Amino acid sequence: MSVTIPIKSIDLRHGSTIAIHSLSWGDCENILNELGEDRHTRIAYYQGTLEIMSPLSRHERPHRIAGDIVKAILDAQGRDWEDFGSTTFQRQCRAGLEPDTCFYIANSAAVRNCQGRIDVDIFPPPDLAIESDVTSKTLLSAYQEIAVPEVWVYSDDTLKIFLLREGQYVESKDSLLFPDLAIKTLIPQLVSRAIAIGASSMLREFRQSLKDIF
């Protein structure tokens, strides 16, 4: 005897994950529609497995601060950008995910007017995604399927940079988007500084320092 439970009745504690297997992409879309847009969970779908993740509140700050740092650098360089936050990205019938934070940079003009979910078979994927404490194999596999060129993973005061090479992620010591900056060490230093003196104060200091670089 099967039991049907409304998806909204599942209460995920912060920091927990639920995996649902043997789902079609249509099933995944139905679940997303039932969950709605006003929620604090993230999803990843790949090869029939849907993971619904509820981030710990302490994991939210680092990626938000890192996103502000990215904006400061891009502004100093005079580069256009669009912040798409945790937008749902999908490749029909194959994968779907919601980053903690993501940016369009080289492709910012192509998606400027996009709203709602983005199908990467129609529009390009984001140029950069930033995640906190990724342990999900489903999420990383979905990123490869969505083909995000660069993914940063921040965990335990450490930043790992992954670049997409021939369909697989390879860890790199340098950022493809910011090759002239020591991003791997810079981001953790600035996140720690923001926690110590406040994000706004850190950003004011950082923007001032960028004037001497660019």
Image (cartoon, helix red, strand yellow):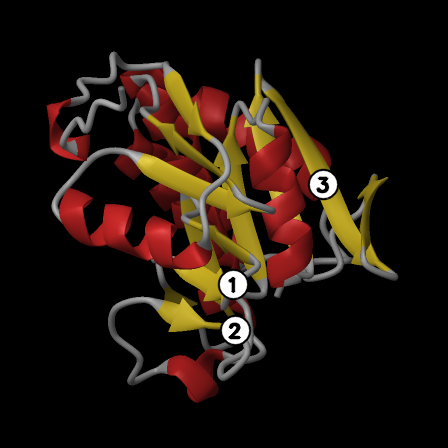
Res 161 label: 3
Residue 112 percent coordinates (x, y): 34, 82
Q: In the rendered view of the protein, which quadrant contains the C terminus?
A: bottom right
Label 3 vs label 2, nearer the camera:
2
The 10 Å Cα crowd at callout 2, few under 14, some 14 to 19, many 20 or more, is some
The residue pinned by badge 1 equals 93
Do residues under tags 3 and 1 come within 8 Å of each other at their CB atoms? no
Please state which amino acid type lies under the numbered disc 1. Answer: Cys
Q: Is residue 89 visible?
A: yes
Nearest to the observer: residue 196 or residue 166 = 166
How dense is the environment of label 3, judged by Cα within 10 Å: few (below 14), some, or many (20 and up)?
many
Q: Amino acid at mark 3?
A: Ile
The image's mark for residue 120 is 2
Quarter-wise, where is residue 139 in the image? top right
Horizontal arrangement in the rendering, residue 59 relative to residue 168 (left or right): left
Could you classify mark 1 by the number of other residues whose Cα lies within 10 Å: few (under 14), some (14-19), or many (20 or more)? some
Q: Position of residue 197 (x, y in %)?
A: 33, 21
- The CA span between labels 3 and 1 is 28 Å
Compare marks 3 and 2 and give the one earlier in the sequence: 2
Q: Nearer the viewer, residue 177 or 162?
A: 162
Residue at the image position 31 percent from the left and 79 percent from the top: 114
> Residue 182, how many percent across, how many down?
74, 42
